[in-house]
Every structure is written in structure tokens, then in C-alpha cells.
Image (cartoon, rainbow, N blue to C red):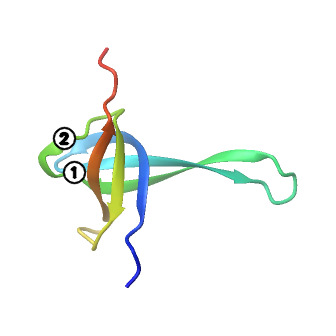
């Protein structure tokens, strides 16, 4: 059995109960021109106890399907968002 994927990203939305939307950014080189560009993917992740808030950096791990779009789980909060 293969290992579960793990990613680190920023929480974009926490409006749902026990769920957050995490944006993961990566850099890709253009095939023809060679310029590096930033691409963003969003993942819906399970957030038990609602510990992650908007702006936090979190680590997410792959899991079994929890709902139609939710296939990731928040494993830990890496860094908290600065309070304004």
C-alpha cells in the first residue's frame, strides 16, 4: 500500500462546520517559454474541533472520502495567522 500524500497550505475559508478550504501553491515551469509560474490548488479538508482559522498555515493528509468533495484531513496547524 502506498503512503498517504501530505501537503502544506493556507486556510482560505472556515465558514463550514468542521471543514476548511486549503489553498496549496506550487511553482511550475512553462513548457515552451520556460518562465516559472505559480499555480494554486484548493482542497476541502476535515477540521475536527475547528482549530484552524482563516490565514493559518496547516498540514493536510489524504484520507478516505468523507463527503462528495472532502478527501483530506487537517493533521496540524503549522503557523497561526497574525491577529489584527
Q: Is residue 64 left or right of residue 9?
A: left
Give how far across and how far down residue 46 sits, in percent.
Answer: 24, 56
The one of 5 and 18 positioned closer to us in this rendering? 5
Q: Is residue 20 left or right of residue 49?
A: right
Q: Residues within 10 Å of mark 1 (few under 14, many from 20)?
A: many
Disc 2 on helix, strand or loop?
Answer: loop
Look at the picture and state if 75 lies above or below 83. below
Mark 2 lies on residue:
51
Look at the picture and state if 54 lies above or below 34. above
Quadrant in which the C terminus appears: top left
Disc 1 on helix, strand or loop?
Answer: loop
The one of 13 and 57 positioned closer to us in this rendering? 57
Look at the picture and state if 56 lies above or below 32. above
Give how far across and how far down residue 43 sits, in percent.
Answer: 40, 56
In this view, the residue farthest toward the left is 49
Quadrant of residue 63 in the image?
bottom left
Q: Which mark is residue 9?
A: none
In this view, the residue farthest toward the top is 84
Give how far across and how far down residue 3 sits, in percent.
Answer: 39, 74
* Label 2–label 1 contact, CB within 8 A: yes
Please name the residue shown 28% across and 72% down the image: 65
Please name the residue shown 42% across and 66% down the image: 5
In this view, the residue farthest toward the right is 33
Q: Which mark is residue 47?
A: 1
Please name the residue shown 87% across and 52% down the image: 33
Q: Is residue 29 left or right of residue 23?
A: right
Give how far across and how far down residue 31 sits, in percent.
Answer: 81, 60
Quadrant in which the N terminus appears: bottom left
Amino acid at each position: 500500500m502506498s503512503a498517504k500524500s501530505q501537503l502544506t497550505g493556507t486556510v482560505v475559508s472556515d465558514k463550514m462546520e468542521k471543514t476548511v478550504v486549503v489553498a496549496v501553491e506550487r511553482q511550475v515551469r512553462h513548457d515552451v517559454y520556460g518562465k516559472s509560474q505559480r499555480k494554486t490548488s484548493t482542497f476541502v479538508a476535515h477540521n475536527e474541533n475547528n482549530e484552524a482559522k482563516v490565514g493559518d498555515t496547516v498540514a493536510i493528509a489524504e484520507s478516505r472520502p468523507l463527503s462528495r468533495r472532502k478527501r483530506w484531513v487537517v493533521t496540524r496547524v503549522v503557523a497561526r495567522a497574525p491577529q489584527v
